Amino acid sequence: MTDVDVLVVGSGAAGLCAALAAVEHGAHRVLVAEGSPEVGGSSRLSGGIVMGSRSGVQHANEIYEEEDDLFHDYRSLMRWDIAAGPVRKFARRSGETIDWLAAHGVPFFDRLIFGGEERRPRSHAVDGGGQALIDALHRAATARQIDIALGQRVDRLLVEDGRVVGVAVGDDEITAAAVVLATGGFGAAPEKIAELFPSAWDPERTWYIGHDGARGDALDLAGALGAQVTGHDRGLRTLGPGGTFVNEALLPGWVVLLDPNGHRFADETAPYGILDNAVRAHGNRCVAFLDAAALEPPADLADRYRDAYKQVWPNHAPFKPRHYKTEMIEFLLGQKTAFVADDIASLAVEVGLDPTAVVGEIDRYNAFADAGTDADYGKAGKFLVPLRTPPFYAVPLYPIAVNLTGAGLRIDDCARVVGADGRPVPGLFAAGECVGGLLGPLYMGSGNSLGLATGVGRIAGEEAAALATGAQH
């Protein structure tokens, strides 16, 4: 007899969903071990957007999709470089997962949003963001008598005859018929970022926006058993100048981005995952250009400068610039991480770009703004505002704010951790950000991470309960 049927390590969205699903599929004794003093991990700090297809909310909005529409879109955007088995199962059940979350008290808005560039909206916004999502799941777990042990950071897995049979916290050992690892990513562990997410690593600038408990514990715990790790250098980065610790995922539409060659390379209003991928393809560095009118708009253009974002979320106040406003620009100038000049050519020299290329590119952009059509990258005409009012400003940007880490444990379509020999590690499951292979070269859009966390969390909990109870699937 084990101490518990299912033991879940981590109390973020993936862990709580796994615990709830385990109870609903027959596990009588379920324990969640959380290393931090509070429930929720990075999930509670998130924007609270969950991606899903064929949900009740979609149907209420008269949006109907085929079973594999999300999977096909996902795999195409990821260039087929993903673990198709678990992604297909997540995608097919994603709408069901949204409905399941709602049934457990998660307060979704009736209106869907576009998480990226999908043809039909699939991203479901939680009223109250990530904290409201966690609060609802925590209440549901408490109602089902799921124990949550806080401040209990698991330091090793218990193994007998090659099978995981529990966990240990110091000298305390707890046995379980099945263990689910849901410890989050490794964004709070600089050495793991340098090793596993090197394109995001800059020792002087890189910082992590999530929970400080995200130290890659699952990699250490399962790594001691020889579990496979996949998804090297995958994740989500957002742009920043360094030194501000201000995360700005979405840029105001009137900013112009130029690459290290002084050329524009993307629609500046693109979703942050797509923009991250574009920056990666253009030297992992770019420069944002703006003029004085953006900082102090003339009265007749104030509304146009204010309405600078394509994304509108029902659970979020209207987006506003965070770096591109007077007080922050002055701070960056003082830190010599921004530059100012009275003409574009001089500014290009200050920032280390070819002045001929930069002047030509800004002139080209201004012509598009005058015409109301971006013939190069298709930015909507409402965001095309010319840069003609001196002084002009340039802010060098780097993809240094780590939002999500994508390297992690390899799993199969039953969320079982895969060992070095290619076989599932008996008794061990994983879900959430500690799993690798579910993200390809880019982040699909808002809700991608929580969609995977909740969906794969459910699968892990169901399968762990089946193992614990001896049920046959």
Image (tube, rainbow, N blue to C red):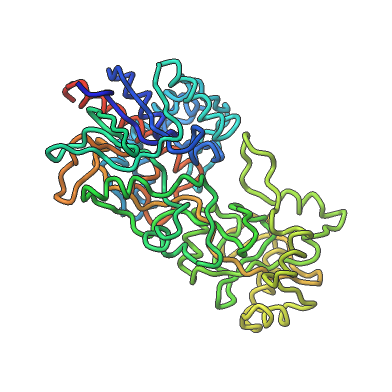
The residue at the point 72 percent across, 73 percent down is 339
The residue at the point 62 percent across, 80 percent down is 353
The residue at the point 70 percent across, 63 percent down is 369
Image side of residue 436 versus residue 270, left or right = left
- Location of the C terminus (image quadrant): top left
Q: Position of residue 442 (x, y in %)?
A: 43, 55
Image side of residue 128 versus residue 99, left or right = right
> Foreground: 93 or 16?
16
Q: Position of residue 396 (x, y in %)?
A: 62, 69
Q: Can I make out residue 69 in this image? A: no
Image side of residue 315 versus residue 199, left or right = right
The image quarter in which residue 451 lies? top left
The image quarter in which residue 142 lies? top left
Q: Position of residue 89 (x, y in %)?
A: 30, 36
Instruction: Name the residue at the right extreme.
Output: 299
The residue at the point 45 percent across, 67 percent down is 281
- Location of the N terminus (image quadrant): top left
Image side of residue 418 versus residue 208, left or right = left
Q: Is residue 367 above or below residue 64?
A: below
Q: Is residue 142 above or below residue 205?
A: above
Q: Can I make out residue 314 in this image? A: yes
Q: Position of residue 348 (x, y in %)?
A: 67, 79
Instruction: Name the residue at the left extreme.
Output: 161
The image quarter in which residue 218 lies? top left
Count of marks overlaid on the render: 0
